[in-house]
Amino acid sequence: MLVLAGALPDFRLQSEDGDTITRTAFTAAWGAGAFGLLSALVWPFLVRALLIVPALVLGALVFFLNGSLLLIALRLIPDGRGDAAPETAVVVAAVMSAVASATSTALAVRDDEAYRRRLSRLADRRRRRGSPNTVWPDRDGPPGTVFLQLDGVGHDVLVKAAADGLMPTVAGWLADSSGHRLTPWRTDWSSQTGASQLAILHGSNHDVPAFRWYEKETGTVMVSSRPASALEMQRRAIARTRDGGLLTIDGASRGNLFSGGAGQLALVLSMAARRGKGRRSRSGYFAYFSDPANAVRTALSFAAEVGREIVQSTRARARKVTPRVKRGGLYPFIRAFATVVERDVVVAAVLGDMFAGRTAVYADLVAYDEVAHHSGPHSRDAEKVLRRLDRSLALIAKIADHTPRTYRIVLLSDHGQSPGETFAGKYGLTLKDLVRAGCGLPVPRRARGTHSASEARDAVRIALHRPPEEVPEAERPAKRSDPIVLASGNLGLLSFPDIEGRASREQIDRRHPALLSTLANHPGVGFLLVRSEEHGSVVLGPGGAEVPVAELADGEGPLAVFGTGAAAAVRRTDTFPHVADVMVNSMYDPETGTVHAFEEQIGSHGGLGGEQSRPFLLWPRGMTDPLDIVAAEAAEGAPAPPGGGLVGAEAVHRVLNRWLLEFSGPQVPVRAEGFTGAARADEPFPADEPFPGEGAFAGEGPETKSKPELETDLGTKTEAPGAAG
């Protein structure tokens, strides 16, 4: 405050006649103390009152609210010695908050006693609120587990980043003989967050053929990043598995598409479609923005990231870098939201969960995935994001040394990304244009861009209190007889809304004789999946290649270049009730590792081909090897995965669940009182009934508690999870 008073002309801490150095220092101390006290007492109430405004607007209001508190603090200085112009007060308050945040964080990270004092205060607060019979976690008891998902980071990208020094924290884990172990795993055909994370958290991704798909019986397009669709996907998974999810027992879900059955939620997309206490996806903002220093730091970082994206995209255009896509409009703000706001809020929530001693935490960090879509998975832009993500990992690992209980940190990804020029950029027309040409329908001269499957885009709309976008006009049929064409990375889906059920090859040929051959023989298409009345489902490829699905084999026919497990992945998707009439997978060049996305993305995922199907799992030594778990399942009669290894997101769920049980013991959620469940596995739960695990909990120990009782004992509130401020 003294430095700013000397540097800014409209900010003074002296009387008009001047004061001694001692008097000026006393005035500064008085003003700083009043400002700190007001921030501690008034700020949380202001933020809670302003949660009705959009989250990004709240971030902008931070500066003005902080400046207002400083003006009040200056008015409290005796003899009127403190004064500042309103615009100067905003600057002074922002700088003071930023400096306070930087110094307190630096001291806390380096001072074990600071952490112990903070944890002691948190523990005392929980004990005062909780039951006297509660057994609190300690460092000698069972460890907790933090699952950190690096969205879109493939196995090979992680290994290279660690080797090149971009991720020293990960490199240290891998180099330490007592550290972590790393293995790749293979995704399902739909290699995207909606399918992978649903299975990882809820044990099933059955009937999720892509990021977006059309359901004929209701005439709706399901999109994984829309709250209503995510909630329905979650209901269907729970109905199929009869299990609330991976995080049902004392769990927290942070920044995910799905809840995992957790009682503590922050920025969970599926919960944005539900109303009531603890069901708001924005509830995590309060825990973070209740600290003005956090708010100022994030707002400044947000502005810096917007500027960084503008500079990087301008440089790419000036240097004529190829391939590239348009990065103007709102994209710089969407990128900044994903790489700054979501990252900061999610990391703070995870730290709060660790301070609270929660048993299982699952958090998704989407920064890399968003940047890689538009800059490329191996670009310098994406590498810089990996470097910043590693700093977040280092902070979480450092704090784990000071939490009430020990924590195991498991790092994983839901998919990778494959590079390549877009389909439209390479061939001058979109998949929809190609389909219309094959159907004999008019094609516009100018190819139209395909709507991008970006989780961050819909997350921003929710943060702004705006409903997710409806189905883009380009994806709607002009007539009911026209096909609906949807894209999920390099996977395309064609549906004929006026044909009941799944259309057959023969029906499509009678209506549009040239369509299937046009698609199968296009150089940008790898293969098609379509139902045949004569042979069952068949896979079609270039040159008239045709293989019944039952006879598919890896390394042969149209799937020859797609690697081990491709045939099994296609066969599994073919059994889904909502598989599209025609499934289109783009070409894949194994020499360059490139695919052609049917969306405006030069780093894509969603289908088969390359690094997108090869995510990773990194776990601490001492936990059972995932391959040993797979082998044990095979010994008990489970079918062995083709090619061996860890195959499918459902298998990853079983591994993570096994790890939780290894140290915590068997804990099974009982049905909520009055819960009847679904009549069939493919029926969603009624909207007015709770998920399994949202009612009572049963576990090993001296007593059984309901979830509200557990929340009280843990000293938590669902309205403000992850109190890390």
Image (cartoon, helix red, strand yellow):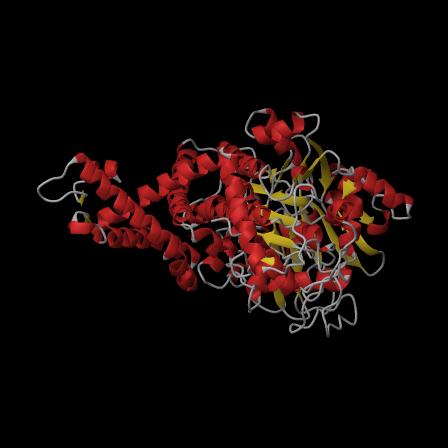
Residue farthest along the front direction in this orientation: 132
- Residue 330, percent from left and from top: 42, 50
Determine the residue positioned at 58% across, 62% down. Answer: 271
**Is any part of residue 223 visible from this angle?**
no
Determine the residue positioned at 48% across, 42% down. Answer: 325
Residue farthest along the left direction in this orientation: 17
Image vertical order of residue 465 relative to residue 519, above or below:
below
Q: How many marks?
A: 0
Which quadrant of the structure image shows residue 406? Answer: top right
Q: Nearer the viewer, residue 305 or 59?
A: 59
- Residue 329, percent from left and from top: 40, 49
Image vertical order of residue 233 relative to residue 639, above or below:
below
Question: In the figure, is residue 292 to the left or right of 463?
Answer: left
Q: Nearer the viewer, residue 475 or 231?
A: 231
Determine the residue positioned at 63% across, 40% down. Answer: 416
- Residue 715, percent from left and from top: 57, 57
Q: Nearer the viewer, residue 342 or 392?
A: 392
Question: In the figure, is residue 561 to the left or right of 285?
Answer: right
**Is any part of residue 689 visible from this angle?**
yes
- Residue 49, percent from left and from top: 40, 63
Q: Nearer the viewer, residue 316 or 113?
A: 113
* Quadrant in which the N terminus is drawn: top left
